[in-house]
Structures are given as structure tokens and as C-alpha cells.
């Protein structure tokens, strides 16, 4: 039974890690493009769009690090302290994304945003369950 749980945990962590790395890369690209526009700028702290893009850039970087942690934990088959901490903290990213989109009025019901929200909520759940299912071998 331990081998089955370990296999399922590794598979969930592998899927969650790859999805998180891909989402982080796309979010970093979008944030950098927003910050590079002449209307926004990198150090224009009076502009709400610049502040939001910078915060999303930092959070996407942290999401990429968490995705790499999940990917390497899936390859090694062992959990770590950072894997457990990231699994508990990851739900803040989709909640922050929804709150900022509602405040900005940009949350529309198109399929791109719906798919992104499904991935944003599914990956922390897979990450947490995968972390719980990884057990040490004797």
C-alpha cells in the first residue's frame, strides 16, 4: 500500500510541479511585458497597475520555486520541510489573483480566464495531496 500511495503522490507532485512552472513562466512574461510598457514603468509606485504587476512578478517567482520543489520531490520520492510549507501557502496565489481582478473589473467569463483559474486552484490541491501521500520507504 505504501508503494501505491508513494506512486500517486509522486505523480500528483509531478503534474502540479510542471503546471506550476508553466503558469509561473507565463505570469512572469505577462508581468514583465506590463512593466516594460511606457505607460506603466518599473518604478512607478504611484500607478496601481505597476504595483500589481510587480507583486504578481514576485509571486510568480515564488510559484516557480514551489513548482521546482514539487518537481524535485516527485523525482526523489521524499518530502521536505519546504514542500510542506509551500503546500500550505499556495492557496494565497489564486485568491490574490481573483481579488485583484475583481477590484480592477477585469474578471470576465472567457475561457482563457476560466482555464487559468481552474489550473490555479487545482494545482495547490494536487500539491497538498501529493505532499500528504509521499511516505518514506523503510
Image (cartoon, rainbow, N blue to C red):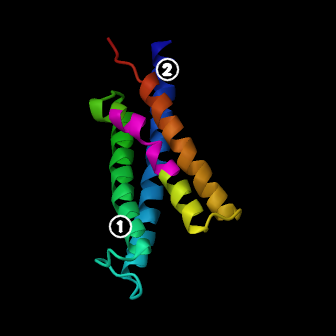
Instruction: Give the image location of residue 105, x and y in percent.
Output: 61, 68
Residue range in magenta is 85-95
- SS at mark 1 in the image: helix
**N-term-proximal mark, 2 vs 1:** 2
Q: Is residue 127 above or below residue 39?
A: above
Query: Which residue is at the far front?
Result: 46
According to the picture, the residue beneath numbered tag 1 turns out to be 54
In the picture, measured across the screen, residue 120 lies left or right of residue 31, that is: right
Q: Is residue 38 above or below residue 57?
A: below
Query: Which residue is at the far bottom?
Result: 38
Figure quadrant of residue 47:
bottom left
Instruction: Give the image location of residue 43, x and y in percent.
Output: 28, 77
Q: Main secondary structure of the magenta part?
A: helix
Give the CA distance from mark 2 to mark 1. Answer: 39 Å
Assign the C terminus to one quadrant of the image. top left
Residue drawn at point x = 46 percent, y = 50 percent = 93
- SS at mark 2 in the image: helix
In the rendered structure, are the residues bearing label 2 and label 1 in contact, judged by CB atoms less than 8 Å apart?
Answer: no
Instruction: Using a 10 Å C-alpha cutoff, classify the residue at mark 1 as few (fewer than 14 neighbours), some (14 to 19) or many (20 or more).
Output: many
Q: Is residue 58 above or below residue 46?
A: above
Total marks in image: 2
According to the picture, the residue beneath numbered tag 2 turns out to be 5
Instruction: Using a 10 Å C-alpha cutoff, classify the residue at mark 2 as few (fewer than 14 neighbours), some (14 to 19) or many (20 or more).
Output: some
Instruction: Give the image location of residue 64, x and y in percent.
Output: 37, 53
Amino acid at each position: 500500500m505504501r508503494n501505491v500511495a508513494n506512486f500517486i503522490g509522486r505523480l500528483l507532485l509531478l503534474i502540479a510541479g510542471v503546471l506550476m512552472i508553466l503558469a509561473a513562466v507565463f505570469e512572469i512574461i505577462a508581468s514583465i511585458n506590463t512593466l516594460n510598457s511606457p505607460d506603466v514603468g518599473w518604478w512607478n509606485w504611484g500607478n496601481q497597475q505597476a504595483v500589481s504587476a510587480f507583486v504578481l512578478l514576485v509571486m510568480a517567482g515564488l510559484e516557480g520555486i514551489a513548482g521546482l520543489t514539487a518537481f524535485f520531490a516527485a523525482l526523489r520520492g521524499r518530502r521536505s520541510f519546504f514542500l510542506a510549507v509551500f503546500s500550505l501557502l499556495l492557496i494565497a496565489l489564486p485568491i490574490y489573483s481573483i481579488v485583484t481582478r475583481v477590484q480592477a473589473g477585469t474578471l470576465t467569463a472567457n475561457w482563457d480566464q476560466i482555464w487559468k483559474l481552474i489550473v490555479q486552484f487545482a494545482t495547490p490541491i494536487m500539491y497538498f495531496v501529493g505532499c500528504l501521500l509521499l511516505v518514506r520507504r523503510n
